[in-house]
Amino acid sequence: MRTMRSLFYLALMIITVGFTIYLSDQSVYLASAKEAQGTRSLGMFEKLNKLRPCYNRSTQPKTAVTDLHLHPQPFGGSSIPYQELMSYLDKNKVQFVLLYGIGQTLPYDSKCTYYLDCIGTNALPSIKNDFENAANYVEFPQKNTHVALSMTFSDLANPQGVVAGIKLLDAEYPGLFQWMGEVNLHKEALRGNGHEPASIEDIAQWKDFMVILQKRGIPISLHSDLGDNNNPTKNLALMREVLRLYPKNKIVWMHMGLSRELTKMNPKEHIKLMSEFLDKNPNLYLDISWTVIAEAYFDTPEKRALYVKFFNRYPTRILAGTDFVAAANKNLEIYTKEANVTGSILADLNNKAFRAIALGQNYFDLAPNLSDKFEAPKICSL
């Protein structure tokens, strides 16, 4: 009799546990089904989530799940509070963000938010933003957004102190910095604020810190202007030299080499040049952030079609972001507008390129250790 009762309770326990698991699975399934019908969440990208739905491009957001080019601090003055900025990402369904410092900051007592409003005032490399980003990261952990940190202090024209800066960040925040950049190789817009572009000779002196980045698998994002409207490729030798000397490093060319000073380059010539660089340099990637680029090169159906074809041809080599600078005089509306402008071209990509770029697979494959945790969902079949 006692044996029968024990078997009864054992069976009841098994049924109860099974029903609980069933209910849990059903809740996950229902949440996944809801995501497939129009929303998206971090759980859609977690490898451990075995019930991840496919991504429905007809009902789910068409902009990027990543913002791989976000500056939480402005060049000068006050910033948007960190928690408020994170809420902007959540409201725009941005689940992955890479936080940059500002490569050149204005003096603390400057009354300017933007360096071009203070021509003649030096805006110089600083580690201040890196520490502030790390402190906010630790104090305000995010549930809905995966946050990564990039070290931005490096002075590429005077690289002697870069290794020491890396060691300082290692000591204060071990393991937190998984990227380097945005750092300026040549940024014409900053010349009036004391920016010193790196020379061919300077680039040869990067070896010590580039070895560290290579060993850790850390990418470096370089702002390197191709040229200007009068001479679109006058600075091209700088990037050629970087790629010649450091072929094993993961290098991201910010804005595809374009800028406010270069808004009139023939798109076909630009695409031809970028294609040649990608073909010859397998560790080179292109960043397509910044409203300036979208408004100058994706602004007509004809030009847009050329870049869509280009991105479809190199789907694994493109990274998406906004280049939003979180000055205190900006708000959710401005961030949303910039995310929509920079991300609108993604809606025209084919499924392979959309999954790689808009859904973040390129980022997961490029950043250290992310591919073990995250994977872009498959695109739903029609």
Image (cartoon, rainbow, N blue to C red):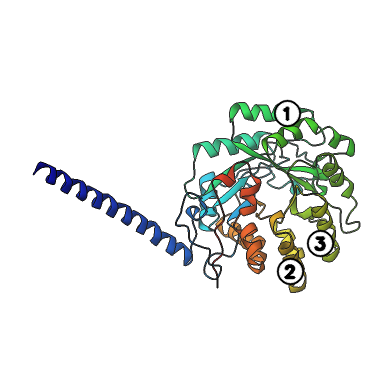
From mark 1 to mark 2, how far is it between C-alphas?
41 Å
Structural crowding at the residue carrying mark 3, measured as other residues with C-alpha within 10 Å and reported as few (<14), some (14–19) or many (≥20)? some
Identified by mark 1, the residue type is Val
Task: Name the residue carrying label 2.
Answer: 304
Identified by mark 3, the residue type is Ile
Task: Name the residue carrying label 1.
Answer: 163
Name the N-terminal-most of marks 3 and 1: 1
Image coords of residue 56 (percent x, y): 53, 67
Name the N-terminal-most of marks 2 and 3: 3
From mark 3 to mark 1, how far is it between C-alphas?
35 Å
Badge number at residue 271: 3
Residue under the image location 58 percent in, 60 percent down: 336
Image coords of residue 165 (percent x, y): 70, 29
Name the N-terminal-most of marks 1 and 2: 1
Residue under the image location 83 percent in, 60 percent down: 270
From mark 2 to mark 3, how far is it between C-alphas?
12 Å
Q: Is residue 244 above or below residue 26?
A: above
